[in-house]
Amino acid sequence: MNQELTQAIASEIQLFQNIEQKENFLFLLGALIAKVISLKKAAEIMQLEPAELLKILDLMGIEFSYLCEEDVALEKSW
């Protein structure tokens, strides 16, 4: 993905003030989804508390969990 396209996508994210924060958020979001980075580390990089980052993900409609789909289904059924 080229820099111009990345910046265009990042500029649409209204949660952060500058383009660098927006780009970092997109990168970290991908890393979280791929389970390459922990929520705590992602929050640290974004200079947020983990609960704040989790709230942002929730407000965006992004369900985040390190559990596999079967574990999530099991926990929801308890």
Image: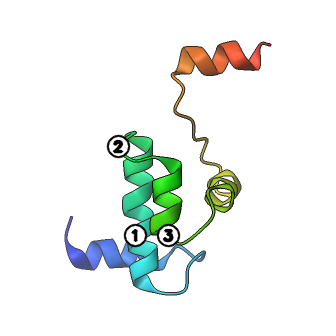
Give the structural element (helix, strand or loop) at label 2.
Answer: loop
Residue most toward the left?
2
For mark 2, what is the residue?
A: 36
Disc on the earlier residue, 1 or 3: 1
Q: CA distance from mark 1 to mark 3?
A: 7 Å
Q: Is residue 42 left or right of residue 58?
A: left
Which of the 4 image quadrants contains residue 11?
Answer: bottom left
Give the structural element (helix, strand or loop) at label 1.
Answer: helix
Q: CA distance from mark 2 to mark 1?
A: 15 Å
Q: Nearer the viewer, residue 59 or 49?
A: 49
Q: Is residue 35 left or right of residue 73?
A: left
Label 2 packing within 10 angstroms: few (<14), some (14-19), many (20+): few
Q: CA distance from mark 2 to mark 3?
A: 16 Å
Say which mark, if any, is on residue 46. Answer: 3
Residue shown at the point (19%, 71%) measured from the top left: 2
Label 3 packing within 10 angstroms: few (<14), some (14-19), many (20+): some
Q: Is residue 70 above or below residue 6?
A: above
The disc labelled 1 sits on which kind of residue?
A: Asn
Disc on the earlier residue, 2 or 3: 2
Q: Nearer the viewer, mark 2 or mark 1?
A: 2
Q: Are marks 1 and 3 in contact (CB under 8 Å)?
A: yes
Residue shown at the point (42%, 63%) measured from the top left: 26
Disc on the earlier residue, 2 or 1: 1
The disc labelled 2 sits on which kind of residue?
A: Val
Q: Is residue 53 above or below residue 36?
A: below
Say which mark, if any, is on residue 66. Answer: none
For mark 1, what is the residue?
A: 24
Number of marks drawn: 3
Image coordinates for residue 22, horizontal then vertical, percent: 45, 74
Give the structural element (helix, strand or loop) at label 3.
Answer: loop
Q: Quadrant of the N terminus?
A: bottom left
